[in-house]
Amino acid sequence: MKSNTQLLAQVTEFLSYEADLLDHKSYQEWLNLWTDSGLYIVPTDLNETDYLNTLNLALDDADMRRMRIARLENGESVSANSVGSTVRMMSRVRILEGGDQLVIARCAQTLNELRHGKLVTYPANVEFHLKPVDGGFKIEQKVVKLLHADGFLRTVSFIF
């Protein structure tokens, strides 16, 4: 298997940047990483691929992403009142497709949240559809497949 190490490095840098923005609550900058048609998806079924016709924990288009951010920044949701700190660990970045119009990458993510003195970990496989743009990428789709999406999830006050 031959890999494009330059593309892998660029994608890894972009994914790390996205994770850093979320960990530091730089939500407006995070919104700028997306295409207008981009979708943020957190499915309830790890085997499902028809996200538009099934139940999801999140299925956000541009308007829903902006509303989600507004709730987090303005405290308009119950979960925002007790927002904790997060640290995301990204690993195993792999390019699945590396075209001029679309780059598909998959990685492992462990999101650690500390809220009210309690540490909770959310492991996931994350797949990104990235649109190459001048000097980087825009997110066309982000699918976060939480390992325990079909089980108990406490109130979530962050974006995966």
Image (spheres, rainbow, N blue to C red):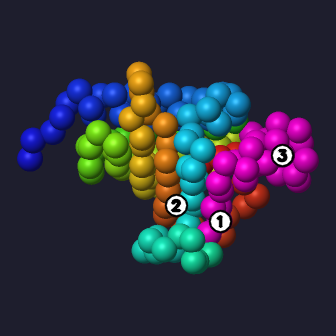
Mark 1, other Cα within 10 Å: few <14 / some 14–19 / many ≥20: some
User: Label 3 is placed on what type of residue?
Assistant: Arg
User: In front here: 69 or 53?
Assistant: 53
Mark toward the start of the polypeptide (3 vs 1): 1
Q: Nearer the viewer, mark 1 or mark 2?
A: 1
In the image, residue 5 above or below residue 59: above
Residue 135 position in % (x across, y down):
41, 22
User: Please, what is the dominant secondary structure of the magenta stretch?
Assistant: helix
The amino acid marked with disc number 2 is: Leu
Residue farthest along the left direction in this orientation: 1
Residue depicted at 73% across the width and 50% down the height: 63
Rendering coords of residue 151 (x, y %)? 61, 72
Secondary structure of the residue carrying tag 3 is: helix
**Residue shown at 44%/71% (left/top)?**
49
Q: Residues within 10 Å of mark 2 (few under 14, many from 20)?
A: many
Could you tell me how far apart the alpha carbons at marks 2 and 3 are, in whole angstroms? 22 Å
Residue 126 located left or right of residue 59: left
Q: Is 57 included in the stretch rendered in magenta?
A: yes
Q: Which residue is mark 1?
A: 57
Neighbor class of circle 3 (other Cα within 10 Å; few <14, some 14-19, many 20+) is some
Q: Which residue is mark 3?
A: 71
Residue toward you, 37 or 110:
37
Identify which residue is drawn at 42% across, 31% down. Answer: 133
Q: Image height check: is 3 above or below 57?
A: above
Residue under circle 2?
146
Residue 123's label in the rendered image is none
Determine whether label 1 and label 2 are within 8 Å by CB: yes
Q: Which residues are magenta?
A: 56-84
Upstream in the sequence, badge 2 or badge 3?
Answer: 3
Name the residue type under label 1.
Answer: Leu
